[in-house]
Amino acid sequence: MQPLQSDDLVRRRPEESAIEIGGRWVVMGVEQGAYVELNAVGRTIWDRIAEERSVAALAEEVAEGFAAPLAVVMPDILAFLAQLRDQKLITVRRPD
């Protein structure tokens, strides 16, 4: 698969949802049968991609919300989104 780009548009798949199990949040993959545990940043990302948004906009929101430099959060966000994409938990599309 191609690496994600900052202008890619991401959105969680409507059939996927995060649930709380024993005080921890996880996304259960219906199609894959796999799960991804969400930390505070992961939960924020999951909540924000209920609606389609660009990776760049998402990274800016996360950086601002956690008072962290964009250059620090961007690699982690790209890696997390790639994990979600590879497990078919989100959709990714290139802008028109």
Image (spheres, rainbow, N blue to C red):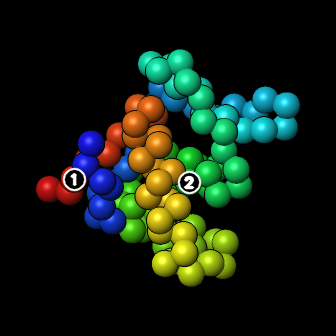
- 2 up-or-down from 56: above or below: above
Residue at far left of view: 96
> Sequence-wise, which precedes: disc 1 or disc 2?
2
User: Where does label 2 land, which residue?
Assistant: 45
Residue 36, x across and y down, in percent: 60, 36
- Marks 2 and 1: in contact by CB < 8 Å? no
**Toward which corner of the image does residue 21 lie, by quadrant?**
top right
* Mark 1: few/some/many CA within 10 Å (<14, 14-19, 20+): few
* Mark 2: few/some/many CA within 10 Å (<14, 14-19, 20+): many
Decide if residue 75 is on the left or right side of residue 2.
right
Amino acid residing under circle 2: Ile
- 28 up-or-down from 18: above or below: above
Residue 27, x across and y down, in percent: 60, 33
Residue at image point 64% right, 49% down: 43
Residue 39, x across and y down, in percent: 70, 50
Spatial CA span between label 1 and label 2 = 19 Å
User: Where does label 1 land, which residue?
Assistant: 94
Residue at image point 55% right, 24% down: 34
Circle 1 — which element? loop
Quarter that holds the N terminus: top left
Circle 2 — which element? helix
Amino acid residing under circle 1: Arg
**Between 3 and 28, the one nearer to me in the picture:** 3
Residue at far right of view: 22
